[in-house]
Image: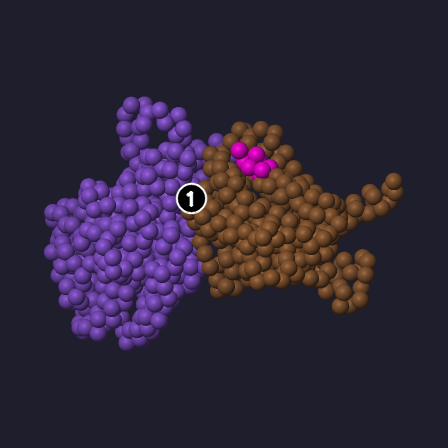
Chain colours: A purple, B brown
Amino acid sequence: MTEKVEYWVKIPFGPIHPGLEEPEKFILTLDGERIINVDVKLGYNLRGIQWIGLRRNYVQIMYLAERMCGICSFSHNHTYTRAVEEAAGIEVPERAEYIRVIVGELERIHSHLLNLGVLAHDIGYDTVLHLTWLAREKVMDTLEAVSGNRVNYSMVTIGGVRRDIDEKRKRIILDAMKYYREVLPQMEDFFLQDPTIEARFRDVAVINRRVAVEQGAVGPTGRGSGLKDDARWSERLGVYPDLGIKPVMPQDVTGERPHGDVFDRAAVRIGEIKQSIELIEHALDQMPDGKIKVFAKDNILVAKLRNLVDGEGIGRYEAPRGELVHYVRGKKGSDKPPRWKPREPTFPNLFAVAKGVIGDQLADFVVAVASIDPCLSCTDRVAVMEDRGRKRVLTERDLIKASIKKTREINPDIRGDPTPVGLGCSR
Amino acid sequence: MNVVSEFVYPVAGLIGLYAFVSFASLLWEGIDRKLVARMQRRVGPPLIQPFYDFLKMASKETIIPNTANFMFRASPVLALATAIALLAYTPMGFSPILAKKGDVIVFIYLLALISFFKIVGAISSGSPYAKIGAAREATLMVSREPAMMLALFTIMWRLGKLGISKPFSMGVFYVHNIWQVGTPMSMVGAVILLYVFIVWLASEIEAGYFNIPDAEEEIAEGLLVEYSGRYLALLKLTKSLKTYISASLVVAIFFPWGIAGYFGLAGLSADVVNLLFHTLKVFILLFAVMSVFRASTGRLQITKAVNFLWKNVFVAALVGSLLIAMEVIA
């Protein structure tokens, strides 16, 4: 092995690269086109959200959690809300749980369609990208009709949901589901039958079961490798057991034993879109009448939570990318949590795929990274920088200073006032 | 030696052809983008978008990396010069301007030289992505050319047997064509060679499966990654010209018929009408090989593409050539 070292070459892949949706960096060791080693470097998308969160109260953090990531905005908000509800011992009305299921599954459809389009784009198959994203418009419109927003839905609040789903909205959702039942067979054709897709996705970036367990792969990545795990199913989350949830495995979609490759992950996503449609239809059918939230107003909520939250709570939810965990520790008498810590599915998945892609070609790398649907804006929250031998945590203020310094360095003649506009967070 | 007929006419013709082909090939790029956009249910850019792009790029600042050497700047110019020189040997509805005995070798040589200059420019830029792109381009080039050369030489040799004044010249196709041989075996062989040429054309213009050296998502446009401004404009123009020229070769071999004869035209006007008709045929061929192929496939890994080109296309070229050659030899 050692005599081959001289032919190896290290190339940086990222932080900014047309194949990557978000800033993330990999240092690839290549032998020709073959990947020998992958070194993952994180921390290029840091906004210091966790630090900001420590200076906000429980209700304000909800808005913050929602804005961690555009695609799984509902998942973060929902999981955080569950953590606080557990810490405060709040019982959520059943109708609210059903509405959470409906919005959560709509979000899953939209996230999976987005990822399938990105996968096709990464192999240069732009027709599939455009057709998948065209289909995605329908669910975005539905979400807008239901919640008022295309991206940050703001549907969940602590102790329930903000908006009810009335007859009119129910009809809109059912129409969208009818549309997806028509479109989905075409989608299955694209992703399960097409020879180009088969040639590029089969046996690429294989994460076998052992690696998946070792690295703790979750979500479609774990299920594609044969781990039967789904937080909605294994945690008996909310009303999901009543709706007959069960994890979608690759063999349910392709009919073959799980290979753990990109194809299986895409197949799991296709299966989950189908499952989400069924879940939404069931949920709309079974939804009981009743209250949608425990506390009528947010100011009452803030006042109550000050006394209710004591101790710690953990929220778990199956985000489209995998299991998401939020941890909240509260102190009686304070409306700010001393500790709030999310754990994103991308973090373990990224290392699992970095192991899985070794031995494949450089051409497969972008597809491999896209196949876990990485969400780096979720993952990068705290950067610990090594500064002359001592470590320190960079805060928002440090980051703003550093970016101003860097901008001045690149272009000294830049005009404009760098001080932030508005109040921002309390610095 | 007559200066006017030996020197002035060819040069004037070449300049005229260059102007026309630049216009036609950039227009084709616009049509292609529009058609692919419609296939993908998008609106697409206006038809003359490539012209806007060219003018914009030509007026933008050109950034030269610190690590680049002089070949980085020289190679776009040399590549375009090669493409212009190639126009003098390209059959475009009439016998090429500089048609001579054996000029098919010059044609293949100049066509490969364009890729060669692109590779030299890319590896002179010092970017690792460009080097990967250059390696891919070189690999693809040595895999696609043998099948095409075998097929082209077989056809030239077979047509030479029919009796012509300049064998192995690009003008041959307008004297005889491959369908004239007429025997069933040669017909089957010609159809197989048509398949070989269509795959070669797709890999030459890097559409669909073969968009490997310039893979945007994988290696950030590969060969072109460090180019900007004027040099990028030159390289894009070269690529358009090369697309037109490669398609012209396939059209001339398999569909050489002109329409000037039906109108009773002769001389320059016949050439102009034939050139326009040839351009129409090139557009139709490129629609099938480039637009539809690009819209209905993604790119392959380089190993799979090389496997395909050797195990499928080269074997097909061998079989087709044998079928055509057999009846003459036997």
Q: Chain of mark 1?
A: B
Give the position of the N terminus of chain A as an image quadrant: top left
The image quarter in which residue A133 lies? bottom left
Q: Nearer the viewer, residue B268 or B296?
A: B268
How far across and down, in percent of the image, does residue A377 sit? Answer: 33, 46
For badge 1, the amino acid type reads Thr
The residue positioned farthest toward the right in the image shown: B2
Q: Nearer the viewer, residue B57 or B184?
A: B184
Main secondary structure type of the part rendered in magenta = helix
Q: Relative to A286, is A332 above or below?
A: above
How far across and down, in percent of the image, does residue B263 sit? Answer: 78, 68
Q: Nearer the viewer, residue A65 or B115?
A: B115
How far across and down, in percent of the image, does residue A13 sit? Answer: 40, 38
Give the position of the C terminus of chain A as an image quadrant: top left
For image coordinates 23% across by 64% down, the residue present is A101
Q: Relative to A319, is A28 above or below?
A: above
Image side of residue B65 versus residue A263, left or right: right
Q: Nearer the viewer, residue B128 or A250?
A: A250
Q: Name the secondary structure under disc 1.
A: helix
What range is drawn magenta here? B116-123
The crowding category of the residue bearing disc 1, from other C-alpha atoms within 10 Å (few below 14, some 14 to 19, many at least 20), is: some
For image coordinates 35% across by 49% down, the residue present is A370
Q: According to the image, label 1 marks what residue?
A: B303
How far across and down, in percent of the image, does residue A188 sit? Answer: 34, 63
Does residue A29 appear in the picture of this structure?
A: yes
The image quarter in which residue A282 lies? bottom left
The residue positioned farthest toward the front in the image shown: B330
For image coordinates 19% across by 73% down, the residue present is A286
Confirm whether the magenta stretch covers residue A241.
no
